[in-house]
Image: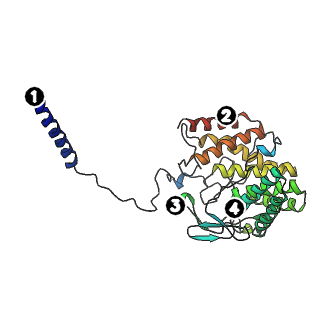
Amino acid sequence: MDRKGLYIIIPLISLALVFLIFKQKAPKIIPAKKEVADPFIFKFDSTKADKCMGEKFVYDEFTLNSIPDSSLMLNQHLELTPNLHFSKDSFPIFNYEGKSYDFHPGVYTERVLSNIYDYKTTGNELYLKRVLKYYDVLIKNGVQIDSALLFPNNYSFKLHGYKNQQMVPPWFSGFTQGVALSAATRLYKITKDKKYLDDMRRIANSFYFLKPASSDHKNVWISCIDSTQNIWFEEYPQEYPGYTLNGKVFAILGLYEYYLVSSNPEIKKLVLGGLTTIKKNIGRYRMEGTISKYCLKHVANFDTIYHTIHVKQLHTLALITGDTLFEHMSRKFREDIMRK
């Protein structure tokens, strides 16, 4: 066949191949249904779950070093909560699922801590005035139950965005209690005003609200003790606890900061118990070579934000205790994400 014939045949062959490809039956596209939980994320068997309803917890001894404020978590200018706008008086308003809420305890603790940082780094009294303004709103919206001060979340929240993981208002969080305790403690260290000592004591008392929740505590619980006598501080208290890692560690750090100021031996036991739980269970959160689990209830990893928080939290626990396992796991978590 001469060159002219090739110029004719090759395009014809190409056209035939294209025809054969498009003649094949196109795959059927099934629209995704809304609110369908990923079976990987929600692989959870309640018949095998630990309801976390023990009465006594165990703890190992750790050294509790006093570390510089600059080494503590939440010691920077924070802009963590999305979906915010501000009133004309500069009060934050939280927006969620088409509704606006004047009070969100996490937002207000964030405002307090951010402005404490700004005040300490600049010395500008304007930031201290903001601290006091936001802190006052936080305390006024707290709920006194027995001897404890708790901060309610007054909105319905879908954990991981799914209806079958609904938090019904008012709900209370060990994460919020811990961060609020850090805020009150840091404010006391700045002002030396003893009224903040009472706030700290009342906030810390919430960690004695154990699951199963008693009627004396209006069926509210913050802490639970599992079948192996490990104590957990729950970010999202539900019938079957999720053991959210970042919320648990923030609660420990709040208790730790309070202990350094109060020297209360009972608070020290809570700190040691929390540290013991993390040390014994941190390996369960690791997903070697990828992002760590957000919690233990749902077999899921989320994004680098929470993974990075885990890395920093474990490093902070290592600084506080001098325990090499925390630093080892912080390094392993960091290496896992570097592989991606």
Q: Residue furthest left?
A: 1
Amino acid identity at mark 3: Tyr
Quarter residue 135 falls in: bottom right
Q: Is residue 219 above or below residue 235?
A: below
Q: Relative to 307, does residue 97 appear above or below in the rendering?
A: below
Label drawn at residue 107:
4
Instruction: Give the residue pinned by disc 2.
Output: 328
Near-viewer residue (54 or 76): 76
Q: Are marks 4 and 2 in contact (CB under 8 Å)?
A: no
Check the image and tell me how it is coloured: rainbow
Quadrant of the frame with the N terminus: top left
- x and y percent of residue 134 in the render? 77, 64
| Residue at the spot 68% in from the left edge and 51% down from the top edge | 248
Q: Residues within 10 Å of mark 1 (few under 14, many from 20)?
A: few
Of 268 and 305, which appears nearest the observer?
305
Query: Which residue lies under the disc numbered 3?
Result: 162
Classify mark 4: helix, strand or loop: helix
Q: Which residue is mark 1?
A: 2
Residue 266 image offset from top left, x and y in percent: 83, 51
Residue at 90% across / 60% down in the picture? Answer: 194
Q: Is residue 229 left or right of residue 128?
A: left
In the rendered view, does 192 fall on the left or right side of 336? right
Q: Earlier in the sequence, mark 3 or mark 2?
A: 3
- Could one spot residue 231 in this view of the protein? no
CA separation, marks 2 and 1?
72 Å
* Residue type at numbered disc 2: His
What kind of element bears circle 3?
loop
